[in-house]
Image: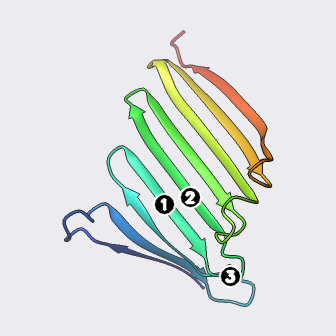
C-alpha cells in the first residue's frame, strides 16, 4: 500500500504556496518514509524530500521561469543529508524558444564524489523547429 500525504496552508498569510509532504509504502520491500516540503508559486516551483532510512538520502527539485521564453530546472540527489558535500548527483536544464516555432534545450548531468571531484558526466543540446510546410 502506497501513501502520499500533502498538507496545504492556504489560510495562513505567507504560507499559501507552501506544502508539507510525506510519502511512503507499507510493505516489507517498500521504500523508506520520506518527508519534505514544497513551494509552488506562478513561476517558481521546488520541493525537498528527505528519506528516513539510516542514510537520510535527500532530493531537491527546482524549476523557475526566468523569462517568458526561458525555464531553468535543477535536480540534486544526496546519498546522505548528514554529509551534504560528498556523494552528490546533479542535473540542470534550460529550455526556451527563439520564436514560437523554434525551441531549444540544454541538459547537463554530473556527479560529485567529493567537493574537489565534481565532474560533468554528459550534456545534451537540442533544437526543435515546428514550422508549417
> What colour scheme governs how the chains and residues are painted in the rendered image of this protein?
rainbow
Q: How would you rate the neighbour count of disc 2 (Cα within 10 Å): few for under 14, some for 14-19, many for 20 or more?
A: some
Residue drawn at point x = 69 percent, y = 69 percent: 80
Residue marked by disc 3: 53
Q: Going by the image, does 18 lie left or right of 110?
A: left
Q: How would you rate the neighbour count of disc 1 (Cα within 10 Å): few for under 14, some for 14-19, many for 20 or more?
A: some
Residue marked by disc 2: 60
Q: What residue occupies the far top of the structure in this picture?
A: 133
Residue drawn at point x = 50 percent, y = 50 percent: 62
47, above or below 42, in the image:
below
**Residue 132, x across and y down, in percent:** 51, 12
Residue marked by disc 1: 47
**Residue 17, x across and y down, in percent:** 31, 60
Q: Going by the image, does 21 lie left or right of 119?
A: left
Are the residues tagged 1 and 2 within 8 Å (C-beta)? Answer: yes
**Count of all numbered marks drawn on residues in the image:** 3
Q: Earlier in the sequence, mark 1 or mark 2?
A: 1
Q: How would you rate the neighbour count of disc 3 (Cα within 10 Å): few for under 14, some for 14-19, many for 20 or more?
A: few
- Dot 3 lies on which element? loop
131, above or below 51, in the image:
above
Q: CA distance from mark 2 to mark 3?
A: 17 Å
- Dot 2 lies on which element? strand
Q: CA distance from mark 1 to mark 3?
A: 19 Å
131, above or below 46, in the image:
above
**Which quadrant would residue 19 be assigned to in this image?**
bottom left
In front here: 46 or 129?
46
Q: Earlier in the sequence, mark 1 or mark 3?
A: 1
Q: Earlier in the sequence, mark 2 or mark 3?
A: 3
In front here: 97 or 66?
66
Amino acid at each position: 500500500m502506497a501513501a502520499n500525504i500533502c498538507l496545504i496552508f492556504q489560510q495562513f498569510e505567507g504560507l499559501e504556496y507552501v506544502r508539507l509532504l510525506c510519502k511512503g509504502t507499507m510493505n516489507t520491500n517498500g521504500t523508506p518514509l520520506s518527508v519534505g516540503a514544497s513551494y509552488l508559486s506562478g513561476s517558481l516551483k521546488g520541493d525537498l524530500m528527505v528519506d528516513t532510512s539510516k542514510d537520510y538520502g535527500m532530493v531537491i527539485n527546482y524549476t523557475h521561469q526566468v523569462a517568458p521564453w526561458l525555464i531553468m530546472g535543477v535536480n540534486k540527489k544526496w546519498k546522505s543529508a548528514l554529509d551534504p558535500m560528498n556523494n552528490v548527483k546533479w542535473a540542470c536544464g534550460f529550455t526556451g524558444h527563439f520564436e514560437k516555432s523554434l525551441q531549444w534545450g540544454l541538459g547537463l548531468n554530473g556527479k560529485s564524489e567529493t567537493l574537489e571531484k565534481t565532474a560533468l558526466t554528459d550534456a545534451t543540446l537540442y533544437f526543435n523547429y515546428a514550422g508549417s510546410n
